[in-house]
Amino acid sequence: MNVVEVENLSFRYRRTRSRSLRDVNLTIKQGELVGVIGPSGSGKSTLSLTLNGVIPNLIKGEFEGRVLIRDPRTGEEFDTRETPVPRLSTVVGLVLQNPESQLFNMTVEEEIAFGLENLGLDRNEILRRIRWVLEVTGLKGLEKEFPPTLSGGQKQRLAIACVLAMKPSILVLDEPTSQLDPLGRKEVLGLVSLLNREHGITVVLVEHHTGYLFRHADRILVMDGGSVVMDGRPSEIAEEVEKLREIGVKLPASLEASHELRERGLVDGLALTPEEFSSILRLRAGARGRSASRSA
């Protein structure tokens, strides 16, 4: 089932001359983990904001085309232009790159409860959801902590917990690790994998650190100039190294290195992960060893 359908989508912000999105067409299936990469200004964040109706309902501009969201639990279909953002938030959860812009309550527990109270849920259901998201996001035991005192990774996991408590079936994350150190990045991306693989949540992840996407994504969308210029499996996108470099995409070191070795005729394949790169090197070393033995 397609849970996201974007048709001929274009958008221009007010008081700007050029369009941030240009004729975008894409579909996303239930349960997919879709990565979105591209240089700064390519339209990644703007696309994210259209998926839960922030654009065009809260952020105005020249909007063309349409974005359809389907709730896999009920089969209901929502046109984002015609559906209020609070209603869409129960189907599509949006997490921004700066968690502090989404946190404003006095405790972790109150932060998670805020959106649930606005939905008008009863107390028992609110408490049940709080316990669940604290467990899932690894924040159990921090219920009474003041959010500004948390680590960067904990703050971002709290932002995800607040969205997750609304029980969305689709999670959109706009560069959630851009302000985190390696440990915080590992925590957040590990949580993303958990939510996708074990809880079946469809994930759209805009991510500057592309190594994770080449390792874990089902598909990768490459954006440039407001358009989706490439769409395929990680192994397919990896074959376009030169084009990715021209666009300005930062590639995983393993992919860069294996591409250089293949260009020189030293190896046959491309490595999407450090483990794959090590395997290629071992195979190369083994082949050289066998060749030396035959020569002797």
Image: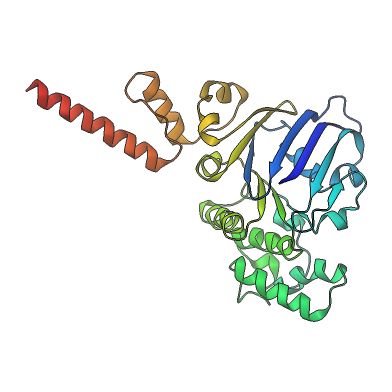
At x 77%, y 40%, the residue is 5
Q: Where residue 64 appears, x then y in whole percent? A: 89, 32
Q: Is the residue 123 above or below the residue 79 in the image?
A: below
Q: Where residue 289 appears, x then y in whole percent? A: 17, 30
At x 86%, y 42%, the residue is 55
Q: Nearer the viewer, residue 82 or 117?
A: 82
The image quadrant where one finds the C terminus is: top left
Q: Is the residue 17 above or below the residue 5 in the image?
A: above
Task: Please identify the quarter of the rendering in which residue 41 is found.
Answer: top right
Q: Is the residue 98 above or below the residue 245 in the image?
A: below
Left-right relation of 235 to 140:
left
At x 70%, y 52%, the residue is 171
Extreme-bottom residue of the structure: 124
Count the labels in the image: 0
Q: Is the residue 167 above or below the residue 126 in the image?
A: above
At x 86%, y 48%, the residue is 78
Q: Where residue 219 appears, x then y in whole percent? A: 60, 38
